[in-house]
Image (cartoon, rainbow, N blue to C red):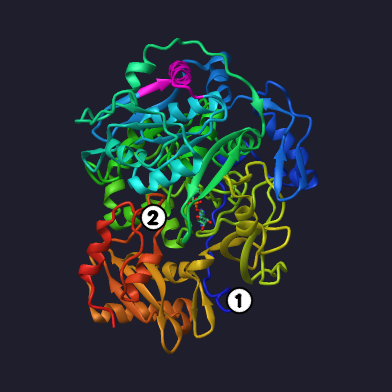
Amino acid sequence: MNNASLANLLHEERRFAPPAALAADANVTADAYEKADADRLGFWAEQARRLSWAVAPTETLDWSDPPFASWFADGKLNVAYNCVDRHVENGLGDRVALHFEGEPGDSRSITYAELQREVVKAANALTELGVHAGDRVAIYLPMIPEAVIAMLACARLGAPHSVVFGGFSAEAVAARIQDADAKLVITADGGYRRGKPSALKPAIDRAVTKCPTVEHVLVVRRTGGPTVWHGGRDVWWHDIVDRQSETHTPEAFPAEHPLFILYTSGTTGKPKGILHTTGGYLTQVSYTHHAVFDLKPETDVYWCTADVGWVTGHSYITYGPLSNGATQVLYEGTPDTPHQGRFWEIVEKYGVTILYTAPTAIRTFMKWGDHIPAEYDLSSLRVLGSVGEPINPEAWVWYREHIGGGRCPIVDTWWQTETGAMMLSPLPGVTATKPGSAQLPLPGISATVVDDDANEVPDGAGGYLVLTEPWPSMLRTIWGDDQRYLDTYWSRFEGKYFAGDGAKKDEDGDIWLLGRVDDVMLVSGHNISTTEVESALVSHPAVAEAAVVGANDPTTGQAICAFVILRGTASESDALAEELRTHVAGELGPIAKPKRILTVTALPTTRSGKIMRRLLRDVAENRALGDVSTLTDASVMDLIQAALPTAP
Ligand code: WT7
């Protein structure tokens, strides 16, 4: 790929220094980079001492069989003990671990002492159901405390979990259960979404008919709706968990014992089961949560709005925050139920100090209007995070002004299911931030941008993001498919991990993510990043959100087709479309001018907040839609198709 033609077109001159008070009292200061550069493995060995080990590791990294890594291999620990019990032993049992806020407005605060009792009882129940160390357990739950409790109960027993999004279809769940040969499935009768109960168990009932390894289905009662019951196989959570003993001795497992499998869809082929293990994973999620959010567990109230069904929920709801003894909000529902101020109402209610959300949510809030967050007291906030896709500079600035009151640093964190934990991000007490850039690798992480021949590109040029040294929370393999692990991540550039993202370095050497390599467009022989065209569109006052795809074109190879959602006051017209095309040309150069601009009311996003450009390409190229099963809301595609003139 050659992004050089566009590398300097998106000028971003704005810089925001860390707030002085935060910098003065920051958990991590600039010397962390120097320390880690001087002795990378020594740095990670020191971070591993954040954890409580039953047997302290003497070895840090074994990289004798690359790319198969072992971290802290002779150490032993129990992950659930680290996330729960040790805080209770340290006298913090009365600290709230989870402020649960249900969508219908029910709420429940759970202290670390209560969480310990719940996890212990759940672990005892799983044992009664025949779950042993090494057995796989599938979890298909809404965002309720039992989701976190179930994950920790599995971790406590050394039984790797495979959490599957509550939004996935029966077929998608069945494929994941089969691939992992799960023995137990934990689900609920249903959950609340958009003001209504939504059943979950019917999908499991359909899936499990195709999964002979499943012995039991453990069912949490959440909605109380009618539930078909399979006697002998199905067990109510309250029937079996509530009567268990409140004691259970956690067993210490070797640091490379598997913790979980999490499936990433990828654009083609069967989902990849990303395997994470315990010691290195917990070290890096704990360190990054402490460093990047500047977490002060005594006073902060942290809220990550992700679902536990994707990796952000694993690493920055369950394992990172709880290993650090944080108090956090867990919210079941959607941002606009029952009203569009719901998130800000929750920030005000709990005095949230650290908020971690996704660009797609931020753009939605922009579209709903500045007046909505303005109605709430958001003065408790002090650090804001972003994750999931590149954040457009305009959305970044809006987030800073309208949510952060102009005073909170924004940490734009780049990482992946595969990396397990954050890899690139500013540090809130150190870095002068730039809207739209994840900027630089965290201390202890080695990343750069290379060209097609694996040469590091100079500042000001574009290419591919690669990771050049192993890191503690790296995936260990693809479950059951070492060859695919090698082919997918380690064969493109020898000795380097290929992330699949386009990136560029600016004149200061800061890194900008440009979207998935598969999403790069090739127009008249030029590589053009979907991200940059989208950011240019969103920087126009009439545009709230944009998604751009390259559609086959007889003359230019691909032509840029932009789907835009207009801001409240703007209305669709040929004149506006022309103005937007001219605007993009002015921002990025004539080569990046969209050929078509289509106005829509919604965009197809996955539950992890990513725009599914593949489906928009289907629309732009006027063919039948591909698989829509991972969309948050598949009806969005009907809306888009209904609103469009037939494609030429
Ligand atoms: C892909 C990984 C990391 C947890 C959520 C997604 C994109 C993620 C950023 C960011 C630009 C980002 C990349 C990456 N991505 N964070 N801050 N800036 N792009 O996990 O579903 O495994 O997706 O998300 O394209 O490769 P995932």
User: x%, y% of residue 595?
Assistant: 37, 82
Query: In percent of the image, x 41 and y 84: which residue is there?
Result: 553
Q: Does mark 2's beta carbon lie closer than 8 Å to ligand 1?
A: no
Residue depicted at x 72% and y 62%: 494
Between residue 253 and residue 235, name the one nearer to us: 235
The numbered mark, 2 or 1, whose residue comes first in the sequence reads: 1
User: Is residue 569 found left or right of 457 in the rendered image?
Assistant: left
Picture coordinates of residue 132, whole percent (x, y): 54, 24
Q: Is residue 370 above or below residue 134?
A: below
Is residue 124 inside the magenta stretch?
Answer: yes
Element type where label 1 sits in the image: loop
Quarter occupied by the C terminus: bottom left
Circle 2 packing at 10 Å, graded few (<14), some (14-19), many (20+), is: many
Q: On the image, numbered disc 2 is attached to which residue?
A: 360
**Residue 408 horizontal/vertical position (percent):** 48, 45
Compared with 126, 188 (above or below) is: below
Q: Which residue is mark 1?
A: 4
Q: Residue furthest bottom?
A: 555
Which dot marks residue 173? Answer: none
| Amino acid found under the numbered disc labelled 2 | Thr
Q: Quadrant of the N terminus?
A: bottom right
Q: Amino acid at mark 1?
A: Ala
Q: Is residue 311 left or right of residue 206?
A: right
- On whether residue 73 falls in the magenta region, the answer is no
C-alpha gap between disc 2 and disc 1: 27 Å
Q: Main secondary structure of the magenta part?
A: helix
Q: Residues in magenta?
A: 109-131
Can residue 540 be seen by looking at this rendering? no
Mark 1 Cα-neighbour bin, 10 Å: few <14, some 14–19, many ≥20:
some
Marks 2 and 1 in Cβ contact (< 8 Å) = no
Left or right of 476? Residue 537 is left
